[in-house]
Image (spheres, rainbow, N blue to C red):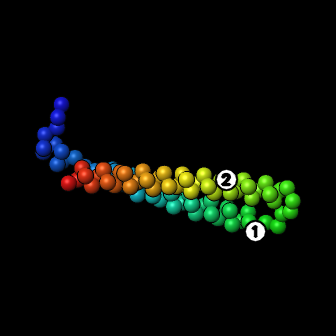
Amino acid sequence: MIPTQSALRAYDVSHLTDHAAHWRDLAARRRSVVGTIKSQADSLDWQGQGDEAMKAAMARHAWAADDEAELLDATAASAEVGASVLHH
């Protein structure tokens, strides 16, 4: 069934913008937490294989966290565009 014009105009899109803000906040927190952990790990005075393993693991984790944050930002942008289209 196709909705009427009045039904479309009455459709509330606030949930999309609320979720988009939440996803952007999650992305920022993800980057911040992983950045803090990486800084703390970099400040450790380790030597040898333990140092190499820790740095390699942190590099992988930082890359994955940034990739996940980018996906959250992209999802938020899609929700905001969708809300804008529906609003107009």
At label 2, which amino acid type do we have?
Arg
55 vs 45, nearest the viewer: 55
Is 82 left or right of 67, judged from the image as shown?
left
Q: Position of residue 14 (x, y in %)?
A: 30, 53
Is 73 left or right of 4, judged from the image as shown?
right
Q: Nearer the viewer, mark 2 or mark 1?
A: 2
Residue position marked by numbered label 1 in the rendering: 43
Residue ID at (37%, 51%) = 78
Residue ID at (25%, 52%) = 85
> Judging from the image, what secondary structure is the residue with disc 2 in?
helix
Question: Which quarter of the figure has residue 2?
Answer: top left
Q: Position of residue 17 (x, y in %)?
A: 34, 55
Residue position marked by numbered label 2 in the rendering: 60
Spatial CA distance of label 2 from label 1 is 18 Å
Q: Position of residue 57 (x, y in %)?
A: 72, 53
61 vs 13, nearest the viewer: 61
Is 69 left or right of 57, judged from the image as shown?
left
18 vs 42, nearest the viewer: 42
The residue carrying pointer 2 sits among few (fewer than 14), some (14 to 19) or many (20 or more) residues within 10 Å by Cα, namely: few
Question: Which quarter of the figure has residue 62?
Answer: bottom right
Q: Position of residue 20 (x, y in %)?
A: 39, 54
For residue 1, above or below residue 25: above
State the quadrant of the C terminus: bottom left
> Judging from the image, what secondary structure is the residue with disc 1 in?
loop
